[in-house]
Amino acid sequence: MKIINKKSEKSLINLFIDNLKKDYLRKKKQNKRFSFVLTGGKSPRKLYKKLAKVNIDWNNIDLFWGDERYISHLSKNSNYKLVYDELLKKIKINKKNIFPIKTQKSISKCSIDYSTSIKKYFKNKKINFDYCLLGMGKDGHIASLFPNSKNLNKKFITKPVIRKDFNRITLSLNIINSSKKILLWLNTKSKSNIYSKIKKKGGEIPVNNLNSNKTIIYKIS
């Protein structure tokens, strides 16, 4: 587990972007595409705003989502809308490079469709995204994998998650942990403090199950 400590969110964002540029340029030189799984929630908003202003060849990057609420993409609670408002509408990127979790069909069909789309992208070979960006909830959930979830140790690509607030579609822990780099984004001191307490708890907390060999924690010290 690599931990990057910075005193401000601005410094954290700048370092993240520097590292992203290096990693995607390395893939570009190899004539390979760069796959980037995005997270929702409030925590990445400033990161996305800054990314929209950076000189990056977005047409060499393919964007995916780690989870999505089963609601319209026009809703203020949609993870897609967050990324669209702060990043997508401000950059030059081909639509074929954007892989949102669609929500127009039944939740089970939408989940199956996303799994199929991911399998097709990786040509039915091993699914290993280059970057998987994750936020963390106060309860230690990541994507839409919540504490004591029956889905935590199951192998799948995506699955529906039934919740009281919003039903959702999520990537599995095994797909997240197969990523080349897992980036846990703890952009406030309070989130960093919560993580410090949570990491002492057991494996029923999703964030404690991240692959330690691949995880980089960006946190405020």
Image (tube, rainbow, N blue to C red):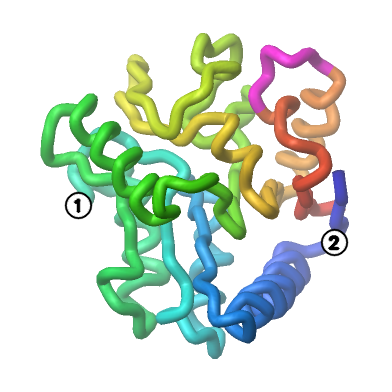
Q: Residue at x 59, y 45 (%)?
A: 134
Which residue occupies the foreground of this view, 106 or 30?
30
Q: Residue at x 59, y 10 (%)?
A: 148
Residue 76 percent location from the top left of the image: 29, 48
Residue position marked by numbered label 1 in the rendering: 74
Q: Residue at x 42, y 39 (%)?
A: 67
Which residue occupies the foreground of this view, 34 or 199?
34
Question: Could you say which disc has been placed on residue 6 in the image?
Answer: 2
Residue 99 percent location from the top left of the image: 33, 57
Amino acid type, residue under disc 2 in the picture: Lys
Which of the 4 quarters of the picture holds residue 170?
top left
Which secondary structure dominates the residues rendered in magenta? loop
Is residue 189 in the magenta section? no
- Of labels 2 and 1, earlier in sequence is 2
Residue 124 percent location from the top left of the image: 41, 46
**89 sits left or right of 72 in the view:** right
Is residue 203 in the magenta section? yes
**24 sits left or right of 80 in the view:** right
Where is 192 relative to 204, above or below?
Answer: below
Magenta segment boundaries in residue numbering? 201-206
Residue 217 percent location from the top left of the image: 78, 49
Amino acid type, residue under disc 1 in the picture: Leu
Q: Residue at x 87, y 50 (%)?
A: 2
Where is 104 relative to 91, above or below?
Answer: above
Q: How many angstroms separate mark 2 from mark 1 (CA)? A: 34 Å
